[in-house]
């Protein structure tokens, strides 16, 4: 009887305090990785299983679709030949901006009660400044509004811009006493009205905290005054004279045809005579003429 009680007691404890559920756990030592272009990036993934000694390890990259990085023991394109794995931790070699994204490490242990564990690792690849493209007009007219453009589309984070005139830095921003404005984020240099003093060599420089700044080659901008040449003056004068002659001829022709004189229509005069209260206009005695009359 006592032995039966002794056997039942451990069983009762097991029912009251069940063992923890066997499951695979996945973690990372660094959830956000920052790497410079052409350097190596380590994507950490650590796992622990309760029963399965050989779990299946997969790496995927999230984007518009799911891209396999490591699957069935091999790296897939475009990672084949430039990646390695140690346990579940992946190292990408010579990373580029295209490698930026969110990667997911998945560990499947079929023998565990909860067979799947996963963790996300975000990779951000920084790119130093590249030589920017510069747009500088060769010739502009004095007094006109002019814009100069500069752009570096490859640097990460986005570059900021500086403009130089004859190798002297131009002040950024916009001031009331300045006739130009410089936007350091867009790279646009705007002149309200250029003058002869604005002529010179212009170049733009892009920079960020990743690497040394890069500059485009200098471009010369000439400012010219608007000048009327002698042939142009003769042509304008001849055109104005011809227009004046045509206007005079048209006026003479209109006068000869009577287009400019107002005449009362006969029909209107007849209607006025038929009115009951109509009285003929008074005639000047100097122009009075006798007319024939009939005597009854």
Image (cartoon, helix red, strand yellow):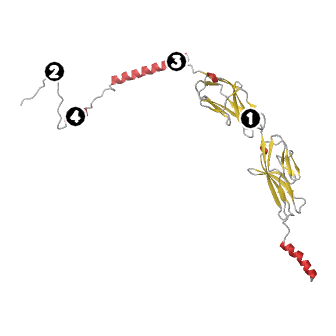
Which residue is at the far right? 3
Q: Name which of mark 4 and mark 1 comes first in the sequence.
A: 1
In front: mark 3 or mark 1?
1
The answer to the question of whether label 1 and label 2 lie on touching residues, with beta carbons closer than 8 A, is: no
Q: Name which of mark 1 and mark 2 comes first in the sequence.
A: 1
Distance in Å between CA atoms under marks 1 and 2: 104 Å
Relative to 211, 55 lies left or right? right
Disc number at residue 286?
A: 2
Q: Is residue 158 above or below residue 245?
A: below
Q: Which residue is mark 1?
A: 207
Relative to 285, 148 lies left or right? right
Q: Quadrant of the C terminus?
A: top left
Camera-side residue of 199 and 243: 199
In front: mark 4 or mark 1?
1
The answer to the question of whether label 2 and label 4 lie on touching residues, with beta carbons closer than 8 A, is: no
The answer to the question of whether label 4 and label 3 lie on touching residues, with beta carbons closer than 8 A, is: no
Distance in Å between CA atoms under marks 3 and 1: 51 Å
Q: Secondary structure at mark 3?
A: helix
Q: How many residues crowd mark 2 within 10 Å: few (<14), some (14–19), many (20+)?
A: few
Q: Which residue is mark 4?
A: 270
Q: Secondary structure at mark 2?
A: helix
Relative to 192, 115 lies left or right? right
Camera-side residue of 88 and 267: 88
Q: Name which of mark 3 and mark 2 comes first in the sequence.
A: 3
> Which residue is at 88% across, 75% downward?
11
In front: mark 2 or mark 4?
2
């Amino acid at each position: 009887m006592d032995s039966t009680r002794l056997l039942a007691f451990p069983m009762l404890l097991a029912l009251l305090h069940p063992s923890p559920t066997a499951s695979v756990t996945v973690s990372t030592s660094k959830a956000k990785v920052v790497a410079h272009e052409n350097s190596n990036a380590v994507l950490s993934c650590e796992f622990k299983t309760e029963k399965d000694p050989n779990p299946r390890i997969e790496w995927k990259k999230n984007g518009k679709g799911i891209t396999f990085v490591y699957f069935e023991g091999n790296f897939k394109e475009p990672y084949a030949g430039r990646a390695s794995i140690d346990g579940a931790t992946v190292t990408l070699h010579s990373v580029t901006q295209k490698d930026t994204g969110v990667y997911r490490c998945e560990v499947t242990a079929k023998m565990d009660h909860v067979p799947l564990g996963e963790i996300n690792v975000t990779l951000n690849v920084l790119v130093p400044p590249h030589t920017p493209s510069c747009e500088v007009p060769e010739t502009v007219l004095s007094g006109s509004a002019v814009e100069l453009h500069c752009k570096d589309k490859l640097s990460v984070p986005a570059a900021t811009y500086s403009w130089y005139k004859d190798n002297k830095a131009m002040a950024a921003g916009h001031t009331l006493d300045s006739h130009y404005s410089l936007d350091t984020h867009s790279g646009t240099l705007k002149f309200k009205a250029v003058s002869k003093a604005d002529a010179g060599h212009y170049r733009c420089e892009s920079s960020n905290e990743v690497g040394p700044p890069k500059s485009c080659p200098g471009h010369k901008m000439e400012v010219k005054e608007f000048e009327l040449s002698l042939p142009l003056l003769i042509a304008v004068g001849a055109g104005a004279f011809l227009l004046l002659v045509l206007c005079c001829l048209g006026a003479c022709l209109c006068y000869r045809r009577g287009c400019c004189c107002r005449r009362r229509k006969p029909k209107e005069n007849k209607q006025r005579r038929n009115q009951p209260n109509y009285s003929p206009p008074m005639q000047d005695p100097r122009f009075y003429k006798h007319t024939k009359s009939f005597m009854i």
